[in-house]
Amino acid sequence: MYKVSSKLKIFAFVLIGLGALLTVVGFFNAPHSEEDVKQMLADEASHHGDHHAAADTHQVATHGDEHGSDNHATMDHGDAHASGHDSAEHIEHLYHQLANKPWSALYVACFFFFMIGLGVLAFYAVQKVAQAGWSPGLFRVMEGISSYILPGGIIMFILLLLSGLHINHIFVWMNEGVDVVGHENYDAIVAGKTGFLNVPFWLIRAGAFLVGWNLYRWNIRKFSLKQDEEPQGNVWYKKGFKHSAAFLVFFIVTESIMSWDWIMSFDPHWFSTLFGWYVFASMFVSGITVIALVTIYLKSKGHLEHINDSHIHDLAKFMFGVSIFWTYLWFSQFMLIWYSNIPEEVTYFVTRIEDYNILFFGMVAINFLFPLLILMNSDFKRVNWFVVTAGIFILLGHYLDIYVMVMPATVGESWFIGMPEIGSFMLFAGLFLLVIFNSISKAPLLPKGDPFIGESKHFHY
């Protein structure tokens, strides 16, 4: 029976505490009005004006203004800056971007860790339906990681609800008047989608998805523990098989709609028929990677004696294979849109290449090259530190993938990695660690009642 170490608990609570503090500070520092943005621009201009004054004291003496003449005009009159950067339109645009920034950072981190739990649950269901013989020894690890979808899903729904209540404005299709002809916010494309993209229906779908996913997770965990209590019969195993088969049908439909609702609708003028698969590949490889990392950690602490290098090898094969699958989907989506060069389609990538160039292509390199180079060799898949290194790069790359999916539509060119991004990641990472290891400690690590556990214990590649 695994017991969560006090060091791990302290580490998780420190992450949660520091993350919450940085996140709150990030929200506090965000502009709360357009006047805050004007003051910020004035402070920046003052900073540049000070440097300019040091180089040209005659100009300071002439104008008596540390901001310089252009900035003086902005401060005194509120007119447009000579370069156009302090115009009323620019200030309003910048205000909305910077106000969205902490919310977007919180959303990215929340979704990233939630999708890991959901990806593990899908992988678990696949193993059940396939009646795989190698993986039952890892079922308790999968059950522990997938337990995060309950608290993670509640937080996710709260964030969606806050968006629907207009507490934040990260979803542009929720703006007032977008479907009202003649309104200043009217958008003909968004107005044509309001039958699907409307807040009540959007929240109902989200609630139904979360209930369905958590209901399966609760049932399959119960069946697994019941099977341990009655190892001579396979009644609970068969129930788990049937529920897993039904769940996979439910999951493949709801995951696609979820990816449209929770991610793709940030860009309501754009759509891709591959997007559901693309998000699925990201969550699947991230989930499998976390299974491998948690397994290696537990092994290092003297647990999971029934797990050998061949199990790690198989997990690493999935990490490698799904990373290549993700790259195939990314290239298929990008190449076809780039080649056709249709304005309505290419706009999605134009904003990311222009404003997020390093992150956009960097995350592609991380998600493809590092798994390819580190895990291609079969022997390397058996070496724990190779698998851990590849896993760290995979998780980093897919966090950046979610970041690049969300930020261009909500924050635009005003992005930078600051306290909200760091704090949100730490907050949810700490919560994730606390939940999954606490869940793992609640049951024996060996599912002795599974009919394939003997094959799993003696599995060798």
Image (cartoon, helix red, strand yellow):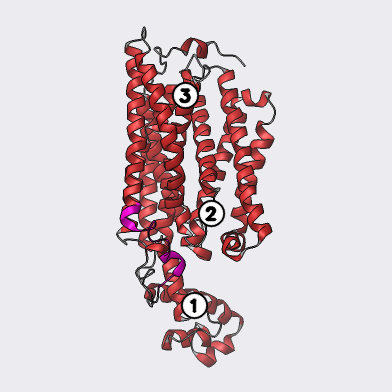
In terms of secondary structure, where does tag 2 sit?
helix
Residue 295 is inside the magenta segment? no
Q: Which residues are magenta?
A: 185-202
* Quarter of the N terminus within the rendering: top left
Asked if 346 appears above or below 263 in the picture, the reply is below
Residue type at numbered disc 2: Val
Q: In the rendered image, which residue does mark 1 sit on?
A: 46
Q: In the rendered image, which residue does mark 3 sit on?
A: 129
Q: CA distance from mark 3 to mark 1?
A: 65 Å
Asked if 282 appears above or below 50 in the picture, the reply is above
Residues marked 1 and 2 touching at CB (< 8 Å):
no
Structural crowding at the residue carrying mark 2, measured as other residues with C-alpha within 10 Å and reported as few (<14), some (14–19) or many (≥20):
some
Q: CA distance from mark 1 to mark 2?
A: 32 Å
Which disc is residue 404 wearing?
2
Residue 186 is inside the magenta segment? yes
Q: Position of residue 452 (x, y in %)?
A: 47, 13
In terms of secondary structure, where does tag 1 sit?
helix
Q: Which of the pair 168/190 is nearer the observer?
A: 190
Task: Tally the marks.
Answer: 3
Q: CA distance from mark 3 to mark 2?
A: 34 Å
Q: Position of residue 293 (x, y in %)?
A: 51, 30
Q: Position of residue 437 (x, y in %)?
A: 39, 29
Of all residues, the one furthest to the top in this rendering is: 232
Residue type at numbered disc 1: Ser
Q: Position of residue 3 (x, y in %)?
A: 36, 22
Asked if 39 appears above or below 353 in the picture, the reply is below
Residue type at numbered disc 3: Val
Instruction: Work out whether residue 5 can be spotted.
Output: no
